[in-house]
Image (spheres, rainbow, N blue to C red):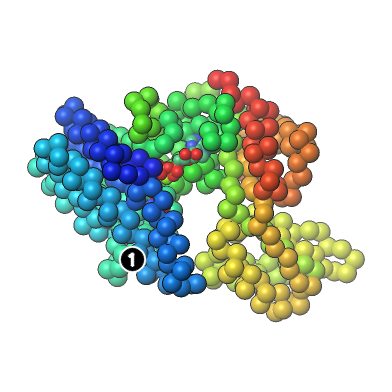
Amino acid sequence: MKFGGSSVANAERIKRVAQRVVEKKLEGHSVAVVVSAMGDTTDDLIELARQVSKNPPDRELDMLLSTGEQVSIALLAMAVNEFGHPVVSLTGPQVGITTDDIHTKARIIKVEGDRLNDVLNQGKIAIVAGFQGRSLNDDITTLGRGGSDASAVALAAALKADVCEIYTDVDGVYTADPRLVSDARKLNYIGYDEMLELASLGALVLQPRSVEMAKQFGVTIHVRSSFNNNPGTLVEEVDKMEKVRVVSGVAHDLKVAKMSLLDVPDRPGIAAILFNSLADEKINVDMIIQSTTRGNNANDISFTIEKDDLDQAVKVVERVSQELGAGGFIYGSDIAKVSIVGAGMITNPGVAANMFSALAAEGINIEMISTSEIKVSCIIQAEDTKKAVMALHKAFNLEVE
Ligand code: ADP
Ligand code: ASP
Ligand code: MG
């Protein structure tokens, strides 16, 4: 059972979670619980770090951010103890969550389940801190925003758990963010591949890495509400024989920024230099568009990155622009990415065209497009996001089953 930040936001909610956990245990299950930091704690800690330093070292940021989850495990263990049930809180390192050493976005490479198994075999409820691990150099690491989902799936895999229940503040995975689209519909099930696309394209409800691991280890995820007992959404391997939906959901992402390198000389090796320089700084590039060459033997290269990487990317592109003798560069971050996702797209022509028509009908300008077998994404102005998501939800009839 994994409980997100809003589910443990205050003492009252922590007590409710404790009750729910104890009830599950009394039903006869062995229960390992993963918790996130309370409410907006992680955001607040990041803000605090910024007040001390404009560019805090990632190692120290991890040392700071990992404290949020430690507060939650201690409090939840105390609340469970109040029910008279044996319980023990454990940090990520204590349960053997081992990661690489990429601070602030570390990946889990191994989980030693022994200690956790011992605790569970003694009949105790285990309360584990999400989002954190220990690198091979023995440093505390964190798993990227939303990383408690990854902790939960990794532990479920190591324990060979029947199910990994992700308790959150909505009833499951919806056809679009229910905060944006009021008639978004809860999906009863979704396959790993579609879920991975939705998560990667901005649907906050599960961290992409957690879905990747669930697929790899065959962990069934049940996304459900911590505020009611409604059945949620099962994320699992979908039987290939079942009828696949053309479009399953719409996702949006406001954390994107766009850059263009202008009037770049048209010769081999230019793209390699630009994107290697960005990769050297661990900046992930998403969409890339290169315009056709004009009369002056030059073209423009535009690409998108994560908004958080923009400052760093500006420095890189400034240097590369001079190195290559380009005409300069421009950038902006008041953009959004809207995407449609569906496994049935590949066999149905015209899906992308429908998407463009729906956006055009709302007068929304498309700045960039990218496609894969199961998704189409468009970059638009950020202010058009809600209008775009609602129009796409309607265009593909997602409110009806
Ligand atoms: P937690 O703190 O429990 O980890 P998150 O805030 O990380 O919760 O994720 C839950 C949020 O994800 C919801 O409140 C919802 O606004 C957002 N969300 C975005 N897209 C979707 C979607 N397709 N289905 C469900 N929730 C979504
Ligand atoms: N507390 C961390 C975050 O806010 C991890 C999580 O909530 O999953 O990103
Ligand atoms: Mg989350």
Disc 1 marks which amino acid? Met
Image point (38%, 69%), residue name? 59
The residue lying at 66 percent from left, 77 percent from top is 319
Q: Nearer the viewer, residue 151 or 57?
A: 57
Question: Where's residue 285, x and y in %?
Answer: 60, 59
Q: Quadrant of residue 135 in the image?
A: bottom left
Residue 231 visible: yes
Residue that sits furthest to the right in the current view: 295
Instruction: Please tell me how crowded label 1 is: few (under 14), some (14-19), or many (20+) other residues with Cα within 10 Å.
Output: some
Image spot of residue 211 (x, y percent): 42, 43
User: Between residues 249 and 335, which one lies in front from this camera angle?
Assistant: 335
x 31%, y 39%: residue: 13
Q: Is residue 198 above or below residue 108?
A: above
Q: Position of residue 152 (x, y in %)?
A: 32, 45
Q: Which of the image's four quarters has the N terminus? A: top left
Mark 1 residue element: helix
